[in-house]
Amino acid sequence: MTDSTTPTGDERPDDAERRRLALEKKRERYVWYYLGYFLFGIHVVAFVMIFAVRHAK
């Protein structure tokens, strides 16, 4: 079982390190996207709840 971040026999260690850093950067970008969508969603829910409470009879 091989991991995509482990170097194979035919590639140099600096190539493997470069690929690992690129993958880490991509994953970190996805984490920021998920965090942004999560915080945006929380604000939308909060505004809808505020609107509902203020307009309740």
Image (spheres, rainbow, N blue to C red):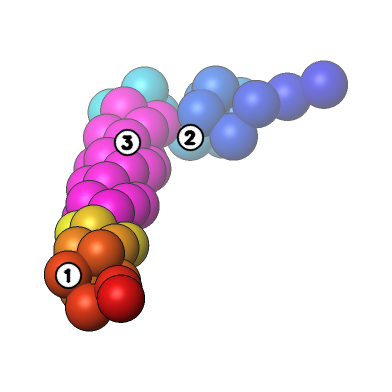
Q: Give x and y (percent) for residue 16.
A: 40, 31
Secondary structure type for disc 1: helix
Question: Going 17% across and 70% down the picture, which residue do you hit?
Answer: 54
User: Image quadrant for the N terminus?
Assistant: top right
Residue beneath disc 1: 54
Q: In the drawing, does residue 8 fall left or right of residue 26?
A: right
Q: Amino acid at mark 1?
A: Arg
> Are discs 2 and 3 less than 8 Å apart at CB?
no
Distance between mark 1 and mark 2 Cα atoms: 63 Å
Question: Going 27% across and 47% down the picture, which residue do you hit?
Answer: 35
Residue 40 falls inside the magenta stretch? yes
Q: Main secondary structure of the magenta part?
A: helix
Secondary structure type for disc 3: helix
Q: Nearer the viewer, mark 1 or mark 2?
A: 1
**Crowd class of label 1 (few under 14; some 14 to 19; many from 20; radius 10 Å):** few
Q: Nearer the viewer, mark 2 or mark 3?
A: 3
What's the mark number on residue 11? 2
Q: Nearer the viewer, mark 1 or mark 3?
A: 1
**Crowd class of label 3 (few under 14; some 14 to 19; many from 20; radius 10 Å):** few
Q: In which image quadrant can residue 9 be found?
A: top right
Mark nearer the N terminus (2 vs 3): 2
Distance between mark 1 and mark 3 Cα atoms: 45 Å
Q: Return the residue nearer the eye: 46 or 36.
A: 46
